[in-house]
Amino acid sequence: MYTDEVFCAFCEEEVEDLIRALHESTLCDIVDDGENDTARVPQESASCDPREMDFVSPIINIAIMGQSGSGKSTFVNAIRGLQGDEEEGAAKTGVVETTIEPKAYPHPKLRNLLFWDLPGTGTPNCITQSVSYHEYDLFIIIASERVRHSDMELAKKIWSMKKKLYFIRNKIDNDLRASQLRRSKTYDERKILNEIRDNCIQGLNNSGVEEPRVFLLSCLELDKYDFSLLLKTLEKEW
């Protein structure tokens, strides 16, 4: 998205060059051609990485939704690469409801991604009915323990508006640990993960969501399950 504020520092000819380069994907050539013209492109954009040029890549607003206690805020911190919930700028987490109103958190590297931590459904602060869905480009629904009717209804509403949707089944580590304790002799991690994934896909299909994107995660064990796949998907699609 290009605004008057962005281009106010450029002359008319330079603005035309930038816009033409953006359409032709040759912005890096403009930087290379202007060896002594440092005013042509901001210094922080010299890498020619579109994700590093805020005025080139439009902001992608990502809504994080789901039941209270599903791990939404912890997920926001994890996806932003924070080592813990106590780091500066981290979303507030806790054993009781902590997200009272929507709050935006930028990604430190993919700077066009803006994650919105929304109050959990099923709480007095729930704003599901008043969410301005048109303001968001991607919705990530986070569920834990089991897929609930409210999660599927939310997915159905989002999909009906032709919005992009990811579904995350969180706290997978807890499910596996519980299964291992209850069925130590027949415990099969791969089988359990497939059952959980299939259950999510079936629920989303029944809600009308076509070819649902489902990721199994543990925000406490990011080196396992689908976290790396989620990151690659975000980088590829946005």
Image: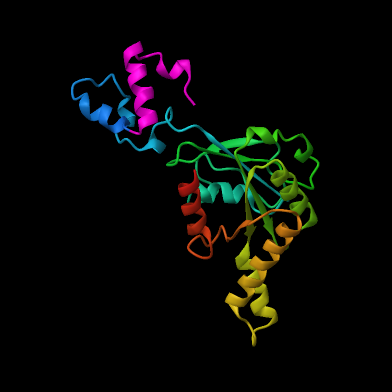
Magenta stretch, main secondary structure class: helix
Q: Is residue 52 left or right of residue 238?
A: left
Question: Coloring scheme of the render?
Answer: rainbow
Q: Residue 52: in sight, yes or no? A: yes
Q: Is residue 205 left or right of residue 224?
A: right
Q: Is residue 60 left or right of residue 184?
A: left
Q: Is residue 8 magenta?
A: yes
- Residue 10 on image: x %, y %: 35, 14
At x 57%, y 46%, the residue is: 76
At x 32%, y 13%, the residue is: 13
Q: Is residue 150 above or below residue 162?
A: below
- Residue 115 on image: x %, y %: 57, 40
Q: Residue 11: in sight, yes or no? A: no
Q: Is residue 131 above or below residue 76?
A: above
User: Where is residue 180, by image quadrant?
Assistant: bottom right
At x 64%, y 66%, the residue is: 197
User: Where is residue 47, by image quadrant?
Assistant: top left
At x 43%, y 19%, the residue is: 6
- Residue 61 on image: x %, y %: 57, 37
Which contiguous range is marked in magenta?
A: 1-25
* Nearer the observer, 74 or 88: 74
Q: Is residue 11 magenta?
A: yes
User: Where is residue 215, by image quadrant?
Assistant: bottom right
Q: Furthest residue to the left?
A: 36
Please give the count of numbered marks on the rendered protein: 0
Q: Furthest residue to the top?
A: 12
